[in-house]
Amino acid sequence: MTQETGQKTLLPTNEDTTGPYFPIYFRDESLEDLTRVDAGVVGQAKGTPIILRGRVFDRHGNLANGVLLEFWQANAKGLYRTPETEGHTDIDPWFNGYGRLRSASGAYSFRSIMPGTSDNRAPNITVTIFSDGINRIVTQVFFPDQSANDADPVLNVLTESERHRLIAKHDGRTADGAEVYLFDIIMAGDGETPFFDDLQS
Amino acid sequence: MTTLGRQLSIGPTDNTSDQRTPRQRLKLIPETARKSFVPYVPARYVSRTHEWDLTRISPDRPRAHGEAIEITGTVRTQSGAPLRHGLLEIWNANHYGRYRHIEDHSGLQLDENFFGMGRVVTDENGQYKFWTISPGAYLARPDIGRWRPKHIHISVSGGSSRLITQMYFPDEPNNHSDPMAILMGDAFERNVGTSYETPNIDVEQGFRFDIVVGGRNATFFE
Ligand SMILES: [Fe+3]
């Protein structure tokens, strides 16, 4: 499919800061654990369960409170669930790939499955951050010891030290068999996480 | 034409913006990876039927304090296609400028009849409607006397559209000192609702706020 269909004629509404008060009331626990559809429903995602956890820091090394994190990833077979892939034999009916949580403190823990390798891409999860003081910022997190990392086009636009910041650290396994990965995000300043965009300046 | 990503700007007088805005230029997404950066948000119809009316906590409860208003509009992508069945999550301060959020420590007055959070879903034509109480402005920086102008927060998600924005009100004195409004420059006008009269419905005035979800992402799966 083409990347852009149709002429762009309308001027976009400006993004704006989320402010400090994104309603916790809108929380949806089924978006915080993608390994199953819902705690009370039979329906498991295929693949290796993982826990991605970490902290979001500001420029002064303080935890960034009140962040809204969104996650987007392929299933264990490396396939994203979009209208384009609906009906594909590798679609996992119990895995959508879109997650969301709001962290009061700036520390987070997201449960999912290890994404597969797809096309030319190493396993990765897109992480979108909304919070007070900023508009949306976006990055991708990768996993250690994946041979596909060497040829990944996103990792390959980065310097060696930037690459390291996007590769999560393995931190053992939980009693119930989930592999734990640590991924801290530094929004600004020393050790800043690389963020990505598709608008040119 | 350059091939550099954007350098984000810091909102003037906004400490949080200073603490959290990336200082490095954003990296341009390599073409072969673009698709992976475009979340497809599955439809989640979590709106309860009464949530379109934020002027009451539920239909059997009294009206909240302040001016009841209606907000209507259409959500489209930049190519003009309506966002059908998109989820709008809405939150705004009460008449006194206070959020019913556990982290709002402003000490401003709460209203026992105002919740300030609601969700609506766009229809087949991308149209939405909700009622709320016209929010109070609130003092964001007491030390320098900077107010946040009246505003309503709106989060839009659905398909490959994703946007968090705010609707502002016309002719408000604090619009021009707002850090994010300053960064928007002339484009700020797109985030201001347009007033209309509402003679036949039980609100004092209406505001039209058409939303266009921008970026290349918004039309990726059209
Ligand atoms: Fe606000």
Image: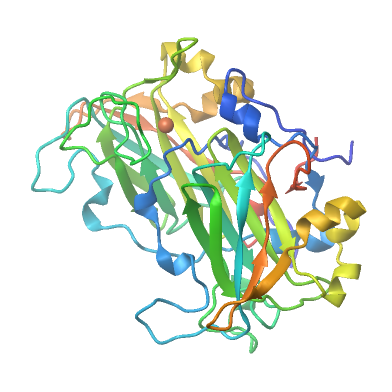
The foreground one among A163 and A97 is A163
The foreground one among B119 and A52 is A52
Quarter containing the N terminus of chain A: bottom right
Horizontally, is A193 left or right of A15 in the view?
Answer: right
The foreground one among A140 and A90 is A140
Task: Please state the horizontal and vertical placement of residue B209, each as a whole percent of the image.
Answer: 43, 35
Task: Please state the horizontal and vertical placement of residue A131, each as a whole percent of the image.
Answer: 54, 41
B58 in relation to B111, above or below:
below
The residue sitting at 61% across, 52% down in the picture is A55
The residue sitting at 77% across, 62% down in the picture is A167
Q: Is residue A33 visible?
A: yes
Report which quarter residue A71 is drawn in. Answer: bottom right
Report which quarter residue A121 is drawn in. Answer: bottom right
Horizontally, is B146 left or right of A13 in the view?
Answer: left
Horizontally, is B165 left or right of A201 in the view?
Answer: left
B100 in relation to A70, above or below:
above
Horizontally, is A186 left or right of A34 in the view?
Answer: right
The residue sitting at 31% across, 57% down in the picture is B47
View extreme (bottom): residue: A89
Report which quarter residue B195 is drawn in. Answer: top left
Q: Is residue B216 visible?
A: no
